[in-house]
Image: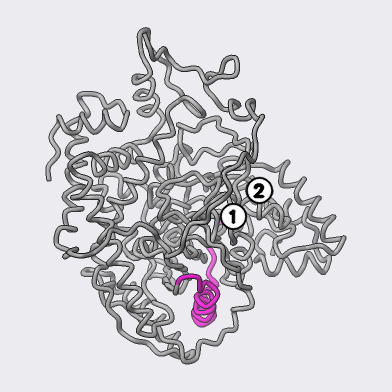
Amino acid sequence: MTANTWTIAAARDALRKGEITATDLTMSCLTAIDAADALGAFVHKTPEIALEQARAADARIKAGDAPALCGIPLGIKDLFCTKGVPSQAASNILRGFRPEYESTVTTKLFDAGAVMLGKLNMDEFAMGSSNETSCYGNAVNPWKVDGRTLTPGGSSGGSAAAVAADLCLAATGTDTGGSIRQPAAFTGIVGIKPTYGRVSRWGIVAFASSLDQAGPMTKTVRDAAIFLQAMSGHDPKDSTSADLPVPDFEAALTGDIRGKKIGLPREYRMDGMPAEIEKLWSDGAAMLKDAGAEIVDISLPHTKYALPAYYVIAPAEASSNLARYDGVRYGHRATLAAGDGITEMYEKTRAEGFGKEVQRRVMIGTYVLSAGFYDAYYNRARKVRALIKRDFEQAFAAGVDAILTPATPSAAFGLGEMSSADPIEMYLNDVFTVTVNLAGLPGVAVPVGLDKQGLPLGLQLIGRPWEEGDLLNHAYVLERAAGFVAKPQKWW
Amino acid sequence: MSIDIDTARRVAKLARIRVQEADLPALAGELSGILTFMEQLNEVDVDGVEPMTSVTPMRLKRRKDEVTDGNIQSQVLKNAPDAREGFFAVPKVVE
């Protein structure tokens, strides 16, 4: 197997033992990337930066100064600002934007010696569940079972496709309503959204600031632990990042969950849930039970209202955050007609620069924040959000250690299949994940099985705030019990 | 709640996004659909519930109010579509 197929843990050990150089490991990924343009995963390739970082990593490893991520080739979602490298959130309104600064997350990764292979496709401004709203065109799922090309999910679709197709060892993602966990589930990889505040948001293009959180997308739970460790920690530049010690997440992977209490929320048993998802869920519960955990039924009574609350709060925050794209300071400015003033400049620039879904959400957000509707929509949604959070707090207070749910309502669907659907139908993809963002909790998607077509399906585990280590340990047990080793057949 | 064409036009104006007159009916329809979906929230009893203002119960860190960088005019202007003589340039705002 070529080195691009390795896990972070395996590569780390091989690098430290001198069995491979970071340069060779990086070359192996760059070769795989160049042969995978059909996946639309990497939208800005940075081989020069990668090789320079790899050489520096080799020197560090030789000197015996090698943090876990030293020499590990990663893909970076286009939402992260990377100095001098296009960072446009998959939007035409940021065409040509090359930040003069580096996001905190990528700074931390580079300080740890990681290698950036390039920027990854995504839904525009992270708004979407299929990677079909990207200005770069679709990212494509490496999993293929018939003539159709499938979505890798969204918004971190390029990250998911790149990791599943072994173009990189792991990738960064971001998650506002499920954008790490849904694509991870659609592509048979692991993705964790940490507790809100665990990872700095500084330098990540903002979508909905009270919901956004970055996290790793990896081939294994152990890799997620290693990667999350390197991303986490307090950042004075993000006042919402928590000034709490970052525990050793990898050391938390003991494989022992005896006596732990796992909740199955009855409200997640949706009407019309496919039998396969239902079976996957009960199989997963059985695996945790076999490992010595106690399975209990729990109730999260406000679950049903999470999606409508989310689709008030997220667009409201987006309409404020995206007000900065005005054609003045960066990115696109429309060509103006004679006599056009500053208002025409704003309106034309934003009409040309934003895609349809982004426009729709900005306008919904504008509406729910406008005079006369603020209380009826926005404040009511924030009250419902408080109740959703309270549901989880009560479950944890009753002794539940982790909550097990499906990650998605279905396996990956075909690109274009939802194009004529109502926007709400696409929003339903987030039904199992969005509660976690509203409550600020950590959630992880773990691949557990294949559906009858042969496509991956994942389960989600939700943990207590700041207990990512314990959560990952549950995920580790589930991963080992499920023994998911399937890989997509190479067709690209 | 149904959004009429006038409301759609007003929302587009507030959002500073130009929408062609011919596209307003479709936009009004889409926005109405999404708002109808949100109306489920009216079923919830929220009496006495405080709107959530902070995701995690912690006091935000304060920092000293002091200058920590500066003299980076060229970096600030680097990505501007139109920068002249050290300023962002925009169409005439004041007559």
Q: Which residue is mark 2?
A: A117
Q: Which residue is mark 1?
A: A235
Where disc 1 sits, the SS reads: loop
Amino acid on which the number 1 mark rests in the picture = Asp
Residue B21 part of the magenta-drawn span = no
Amino acid on which the number 2 mark rests in the picture = Leu
Measured as percent of width and height from the top left, residue A281 is found at 36, 77
User: Local crowd at mark 2 within 10 Å, few (<14), some, or many (≥20)?
Assistant: many
Q: Looking at the image, how many numbered discs can be counted on the residues?
A: 2
The image quadrant of residue A221 is: bottom right
Measured as percent of width and height from the top left, residue A374 is found at 23, 46
Q: Which residues are magenta?
A: A465-492
Residue closer to the observer: A77 or A35: A77
Q: Nearer the viewer, mark 2 or mark 1?
A: 1
Decide if residue A58 is on the left or right side of residue A489: right
Please report the residue visible at 43 percent of the width from the left and 43 percent of the height from the top.
Answer: A125
Q: Which mark is residue B47?
A: none
Measured as percent of width and height from the top left, residue A135 is found at 45, 37
Decide if residue A274 is on the left or right side of residue A30: left
Where is A325 relative to A59, above or below? above
Where is A312 relative to A277, above or below? above
Locate the N terminus of chain A and report the quarter of the image it occupies.
bottom right
Where is A124 relative to A303, above or below? above
Q: Chain of mark 1?
A: A
Q: Chain of mark 2?
A: A
The image quadrant of residue A178 is: bottom left
